[in-house]
Amino acid sequence: SAGRGAGSKAQQPQQRSQAPPPPPPPPGQMPSAGRGAGSKATVQQQQAPRKTVGHSSNSSSAVQPSPLVAELFQVMRNEERAKLEISNAAKSPSGFSFGKGGAEFQENVMNELVEKSKHHQSVLADVEKMGPRMSELKNDLMAFKAQNMEEVLAFTEKVDELLAGLTDENEMCRRFLMGDMTAKLDSLRQSSGDYKALLALKENAQSFKVGKQSCALELHGIVTAYEKLSRVVEDELRNIQQTSSSRNKIGIPWNAELIEPTKASALVYAKVYMELVLIEVERLKTVWNPSISQPLGSVVDPKSLLNAAVTFAFKVHQFVGGFDTECNEILQKVEAEFSSYKGGA
């Protein structure tokens, strides 16, 4: 009845006010994790009398664990984790929302898809247009066997011209060439590059000219050019030893004989070096007097120049394996001048 309900409601506050508070937990013991509303009220009742602010160092019993701060910290972490998950979902391209800046991201994705689609369509067009020619290239690669490196250069240039017009060379080779034919094409290109490097060094040596700088600078330039040639030749010799067998099996005449013309071109540097020294020694005859003490660094000692010429000539001789007729003739002139200077450095 309405009256009974009103009476019971009036009695409830009185009953709650008469209920004694639960006893506090013993010191050092944490309350159980499953606290309800009553436990929160208990914590508040325990903490209510403490109104002092500051650090107390009178008794260690004033510092006790606070279950409330741990609970609040856990609630805070849960809220932050939830916010982070919502934010990540908004930024994810696979989500329903692109978040802040999502329109720009979506536009970039669409543009990339369009470009890939154009690239794919271009590849398909190459397949239809160049498919027969790529099949011919496969057969040409299988049958190719060169007699000399000039044939390798010509064949490689022809292949490069064909592949240069493709949208995606790698994709076309993957579609039409087997793995071993692709490896053969790579070896042909590598061999062509190595051979061109040797030819370039030989041409540089054969066309080498002395400039108009001082004798010391010109001699230094000759030595630098020779050292570059010798270093590349030595590298190619090791390369040939490592790759000649595999390249010969696929029809590439790759052997040490290819090195000899480039190595022999180093004699040009020996000739130019000795000729320049002879010219400088002839000039120094007008200013050099071994019986007179010369200021340090004022005049180069002719004998030191001749010594350098002999040393450099010997180095080139050992590298090449000998001298040609012209080199021997210049060396004899150096020997004549060398014998005429008994003093000097």
Image: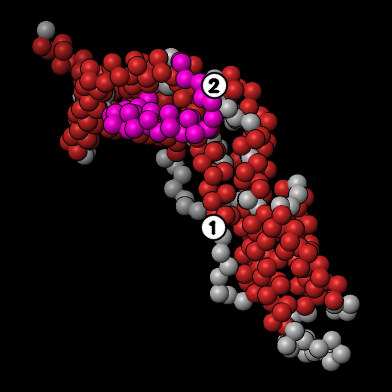
At x 65% / y 64%, what residue is drawn?
272
Mark found first going from the N terminus, 1 or 2: 1
At x 77% / y 77%, what residue is drawn?
302
Q: Amino acid at mark 2?
A: Gly
At x 62% / y 76%, what residue is drawn?
214
Q: Nearer the viewer, residue 200 or 50?
A: 200
Q: Mark 2 = which residue?
A: 251
The disc placed on residue 207 is: 1
Q: Which residues are magenta?
A: 142-170
**Quadrant of residue 204 within the rendered picture:** bottom right
Q: Position of residue 75 (x, y in %)?
A: 38, 30
Q: Is residue 158 magenta?
A: yes
The disc placed on residue 29 is: none
Q: Quadrant of the N terminus?
A: top left
Q: Quadrant of the C terminus?
A: bottom right
Q: Nearer the viewer, residue 32 or 114?
A: 114
Report the Cα–Cα distance between label 1 and label 2.
Answer: 33 Å
**Quadrant of residue 277 within the rendered picture:** bottom right
1 and 2 marks in contact (CB < 8 Å): no
